[in-house]
Image (cartoon, grey):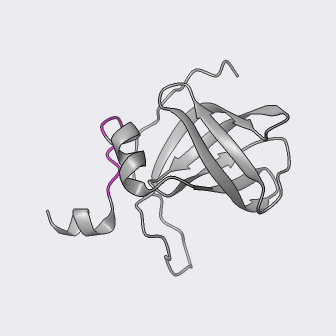
Amino acid sequence: MTGKAVAAEAEMEPVPGSTERRRNTRKRVLLGAVLDTGGRSFECVVVNLSLGGARIHSSEPFLPGQKVTLELQRFGSFEATVIWQRERSCGLRFTADAASILDRIGGSLPLTTPDAESAD
């Protein structure tokens, strides 16, 4: 992986068979990234992105509750907390508020809150 961000077609990712609890719309992406744990850095791939967090694929395991920094070449660094880990996938919750995330990446990927979408 070169670390270069390559965006795939952004679209909502449905979660089959589950009750959606998310406050923010998720977009499918394919972005090369680096996850920094404070002592080590690991290459990863972001597979979905929202104003609240991201899902990544990595060959390294991470622990729920672990504080990390997700570094996206195209958008900068985002402080986050690992929420869950399953096999090669990991869910991150950004520590910054949705408005600040929207300011940084909303123009490149149409990330909005569900309330903003229903206003259209």
Q: Is residue 104 visible?
A: yes
| Residue 68 percent across, percent down from the top left | 71, 46
Where 113 falls versus 103 (above or below)? below
Tell me which secondary structure the magenta stretch mostly adopts: loop
Is 11 displayed left or right of 39 in the figure? left
Which is more toward the observer, 30 or 67?
67
Q: Is residue 12 visible?
A: no
Task: Assess whether residue 109 is covered by the magenta stretch.
Answer: yes
Q: How many marks?
A: 0
Where's the N terminus, which quadrant? Answer: top right
Residue at 54% x, 49% y: name it: 48
Residue at 66% x, 47% y: name it: 56
Residue at 74% x, 36% y: name it: 36
Give the magenta-colored segment's residue range. Answer: 107-112
Where 117 falls versus 20 (above or below)? above
Residue at 76% x, 42% y: name it: 58
Task: Assess whether residue 18 is covered by the magenta stretch.
Answer: no
| Residue 2 percent across, percent down from the top left | 67, 18
| Residue 55 percent across, percent down from the top left | 62, 52
Rendered image quadrant of residue 51: bottom left
Where's the C terminus, which quadrant? Answer: bottom left
Rendered image quadrant of residue 23: bottom left
Is 50 displayed left or right of 78 in the figure? left
Rendered image quadrant of residue 114: bottom left
| Residue 92 percent across, percent down from the top left | 64, 55
Where 77 falls versus 65 (above or below)? above
